[in-house]
């Protein structure tokens, strides 16, 4: 069964620190992986899309990596800010007409 | 502005009363889908559509219907809502079904449905 796992479910970090969020998936034959941000009561905002042929993508303070052979992706956030507080979701497209989501990591940046 | 628009954003209804949640995208995307989000279960796909008049079941289709008469619209229909359909619903679209690996998915703002 194709599954996506995000651990931990919640993370609190002091402002200014760099941090890493983890995503693991069970099938290395993926098409792409996408990281989203979800604010309470709001929709999903796409942060980064990594194609299967890529190893990383960067956008501002965010860097996402992909290691298909080990079934892992990380989202690195540099110099964290209180505005980064949100739930971060990892979603994998396994080629079966849907995104398979992890249950997310709820990130709190402590001022 | 490129976007996926869902309406309504919030809805409280009673068991058995038919309702429709609308979804519209202005990006000329071929692929659209519906997800529901429940605590501890993440987002699960309900239905998807690869193009006009082409729809198929996702992981949790029971109790739902969809239609795709136009490319931009993909309404979600609950013919007889039940309390277990209380959830947060998201509509999504992407240029195609993802066979091209650079397909990014865009999501609406969500519809919080409560069935009492």
Image (cartoon, coloured by chain):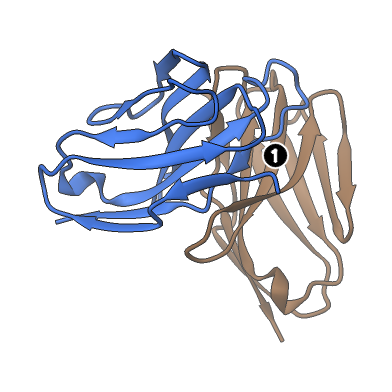
Residue under the image location 44 percent in, 13 percent down: B53
Q: How many numbered marks, from 0 up?
A: 1
Left or right side of B85 for A60 = right
At label 1, counting other C-alpha atoms closer than 10 Å, the crowd grade (few under 14, some 14-19, many 20 or more) is many
Residue under the image location 75 percent in, 22 percent down: B101
Residue under the image location 46 percent in, 47 percent down: B6
What is the letter of the blue chain?
A: B
Estimate the x, y position of residue B23 in percent, counting from the top left.
Answer: 46, 39
Looking at the picture, tell me which residue is in the foreground, B95 or B42: B95
Estimate the x, y position of residue A111 in percent, counting from the top left.
Answer: 72, 87
Q: Residue furthest bottom?
A: A111
Estimate the x, y position of residue A85 in percent, counting from the top left.
Answer: 65, 70
The quarter holding residue A68 reads top right
The quarter holding residue B104 reads top right
Left or right side of B115 for B27 = right
Q: Is residue B17 above or below residue B76?
A: below
Q: In this figure, which residue is indicated by the disc labeled 1?
A: A34
Looking at the picture, tell me which residue is in the foreground, B78 or B2: B2
Left or right side of A65 for B7 = left
Estimate the x, y position of residue B85 in percent, counting from the top left.
Answer: 25, 44
Residue B39, visible in the rendered structure? no
Residue A52, visible in the rendered structure? yes
What is the letter of the brown chain?
A: A
Report in which chain the residue with disc 1 lies. A
């Amino acid at each position: 069964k194709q599954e996506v796992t995000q651990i931990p479910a919640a993370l609190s970090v002091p402002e200014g620190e760099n941090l890493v969020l983890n995503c693991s998936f069970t099938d290395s034959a993926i098409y792409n992986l996408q990281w989203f941000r979800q604010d309470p009561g709001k929709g999903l905002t796409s942060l980064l899309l990594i194609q299967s042929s890529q190893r990383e993508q960067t956008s501002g303070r965010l860097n996402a990596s992909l290691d298909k052979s080990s079934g892992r992706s990380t989202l690195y956030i540099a110099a964290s800010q209180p505005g980064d507080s949100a739930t971060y979701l990892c979603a994998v497209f396994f080629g079966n007409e849907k995104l398979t989501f992890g249950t997310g990591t709820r990130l709190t940046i402590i001022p | 502005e490129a976007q996926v628009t869902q309406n309504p954003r919030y809805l409280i209804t009673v068991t058995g009363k038919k309702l429709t949640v609308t979804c519209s995208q202005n990006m000329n995307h071929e692929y659209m889908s519906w997800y529901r989000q429940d605590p501890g279960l993440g987002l699960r796909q309900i239905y998807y559509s690869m193009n006009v008049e082409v729809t198929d079941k996702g992981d949790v289709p029971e109790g739902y219907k969809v239609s795709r008469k136009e490319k931009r619209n993909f309404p979600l229909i609950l013919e007889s809502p039940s309390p277990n359909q209380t959830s947060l619903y998201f509509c999504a679209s992407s240029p195609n079904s993802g066979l091209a690996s650079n397909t990014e998915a865009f999501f609406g703002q969500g519809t919080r449905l409560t069935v009492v």
